């Protein structure tokens, strides 16, 4: 017979098991990609362009799957790619949200991001409708819309800020805030 204490431990283990498994969610970035982001951590403009390269790779993969010969598992692969695309966009948006208030100089990267976003929007809409990836595609398109809005807003904010506060001449890409 199981004692009350044993039963309580068994119940707790059963209830906590799903929580541990949920935390093992697969990352949308490979170890190599995470390393690239770490290398660019102190260079915001470069970091944005690293995100752009990751998103270009996912967009290319979506394009190849949708234009290539039909293979088994294509819908699941597209589902996964849309999910990865959305996750990476969310991470990029978080970075943009951090860089904006700190006036990090993104003036070279943001126009490139907007140009790439136009390509991605077309690519994300290329595959025909399918229930297997309708929701992840919609989420990716919404995340893309949010990033485009943030980038457009940041371009205007940065034009204004850097007109009033020119970057220092030491080349670190930052402007000192007045105290």
Image: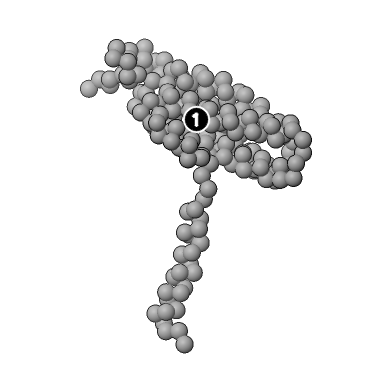
The residue shown at (68%, 31%) is: 63
User: What percent of the width, then of the height, locates residue 79?
Assistant: 65, 43
Q: Is residue 6 above or below residue 70?
A: below
**178 with respect to 123 (left or right):** left
Read off the residue under disc 1: 51
Q: Residues within 10 Å of mark 1 (few under 14, many from 20)?
A: many
- Point out the residue furthest to the front here: 32
Q: In what quadrant of the picture does the C terminus appear?
A: top left
- Point out the residue furthest to the left here: 179
**123 with respect to 87 (left or right):** right
The residue shown at (57%, 20%) is: 115
**110 with respect to 128 (left or right):** left
Q: Is residue 179 above or below residue 169?
A: below
- Is residue 113 in view? yes
The residue shown at (37%, 23%) is: 104
Q: Is residue 13 above or below residue 114?
A: below
User: What percent of the width, then of the height, locates residue 158?
Assistant: 41, 19
**167 with respect to 91 (left or right):** left
Residue 166 quadrant: top left
User: What percent of the width, then of the height, locates residue 116?
Assistant: 57, 23
User: What percent of the width, then of the height, locates residue 103?
Assistant: 36, 23
Secondary structure under the numbered disc 1 in the rendered image: helix
- Is residue 165 in view? no
Nearer-the-camera pick, 130 or 76: 76
The residue shown at (32%, 19%) is: 172
Residue 123 quadrant: top right
- Image colouring: one colour
């Amino acid at each position: 017979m199981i004692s009350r204490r044993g039963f309580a431990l068994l119940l707790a283990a059963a209830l906590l098991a799903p929580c541990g498994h949920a935390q093992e969610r697969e990352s949308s970035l490979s170890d190599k990609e995470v390393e690239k982001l770490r290398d660019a951590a102190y260079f915001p403009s470069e970091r944005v362009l690293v995100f752009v390269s990751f998103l270009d790779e996912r967009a290319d993969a979506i394009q190849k799957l949708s234009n290539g010969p039909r293979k088994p598992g294509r819908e699941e692969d597209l589902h996964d790619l849309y999910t990865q695309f959305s996750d990476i966009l969310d991470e990029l948006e978080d970075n943009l949200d951090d860089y904006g208030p700190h006036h990090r100089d993104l003036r070279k990267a943001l126009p490139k991001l907007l140009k790439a976003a136009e390509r991605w929007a077309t690519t994300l809409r290329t595959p025909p409708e399918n229930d297997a990836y309708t929701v992840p595609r919609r989420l990716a398109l919404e995340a893309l819309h949010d990033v485009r809005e943030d980038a457009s807003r940041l371009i205007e904010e940065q034009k204004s800020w850097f007109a009033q506060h020119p970057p220092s001449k030491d080349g670190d890409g930052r402007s000192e805030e007045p105290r």
